[in-house]
Amino acid sequence: MIRTRKAEITFARLRDVPPEVIIAHMSDPRVGEHMPLLTFDWDGAEVAKFVAAKEECWRRDGLGHWAIFSNGDYVGWGGFQKEGQEWDFGLVLRPDAFGLGWHIAAKALAFARADQRIPYVTFLLPPSRKNLGALRRIGAEPVGDVDYDGARFLKFRLATS
């Protein structure tokens, strides 16, 4: 279990994470429990496509998903990805780092508040996620249900300015 106290959270690019680390992370069945779009097995080719897609977001939008580290250890990936005109925030952690979620989200949302390109952030959560109180506590408002790549998600929006 990754300790949440005194965790120094840092962000880097996914291209800097060895593919086998991402494969191990994304192949853990606990990671896929709330990821309805995760319908394939991770291997070197999938990681290469995944990292290339995330790098394309960085090239196109100047921002994208990060590799996330706690005290120097890879704990997952997430960040902001532009979906149409909206900046969507996503976070996918290793199971032993699930407790770091709000600590990481707070750092990422502070980044969003300081970035003039991001007037608000959206969150897409699968209906299997039942504990949504933290989103409401930070001021995120429900927008409704949306279909994304054939899966239903609950959409929330949080003003950052």
Image (spheres, rainbow, N blue to C red):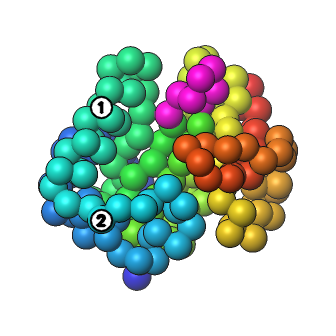
The x, y position of residue 38, in whole percent, is 44, 60
Name the residue nearer the viewer: 22 or 42. Answer: 42
Q: Residue at x 54, y 61 (%)?
A: 36
The x, y position of residue 147, in whole percent, is 67, 44
Q: Which residues are magenta?
A: 81-87
Q: Please tell me whether residue 104 is drawn above or below residue 158 in the rendered image.
A: below
Q: Please tell me whether residue 133 is drawn above or below residue 56 in the rendered image.
A: below
Give amino acid for label 1. Answer: Glu
- Horizontal side of 44 relative to 35 (left or right) equals left
Are the residues flagged by discs 2 and 1 in contact, CB closer than 8 Å?
no
Give the quarter of the image for residue 31: bottom left
Give the position of the C terminus as an image quadrant. Answer: top right
Q: Residues within 10 Å of mark 1 (few under 14, many from 20)?
A: many
The x, y position of residue 91, in whole percent, is 51, 53
Q: Residue at x 20, y 60 (%)?
A: 43
The x, y position of residue 66, in whole percent, is 37, 43
Q: Mark 2 or mark 1: name the one nearer the start of the chain.
A: 2
Can residue 46 be seen at all in this image of the molecule?
Answer: yes
Give the quarter of the image for residue 71: bottom left
Q: What number of labels is visible?
A: 2
Q: Please tell me whether residue 64 is drawn above or below residue 134 in the rendered image.
A: above
Name the residue nearer the viewer: 159 or 22. Answer: 22
Q: Secondary structure at mark 2?
A: loop
Q: Residue at x 68, y 52 (%)?
A: 153
Q: In this view, which residue lies farthest toward the front?
A: 150
- Horizontal side of 89 relative to 56 (left or right) equals right
Q: Residues within 10 Å of mark 2 (few under 14, many from 20)?
A: few
Give the position of the N terminus as an image quadrant. Answer: bottom left
Name the residue nearer the viewer: 96 or 21. Answer: 21
Q: Please tell me whether residue 144 is drawn above or below residue 127 in the rendered image.
A: above
The numbered mark at residue 55 is 1
Question: Which residue is labeled 2 in the image?
Answer: 41
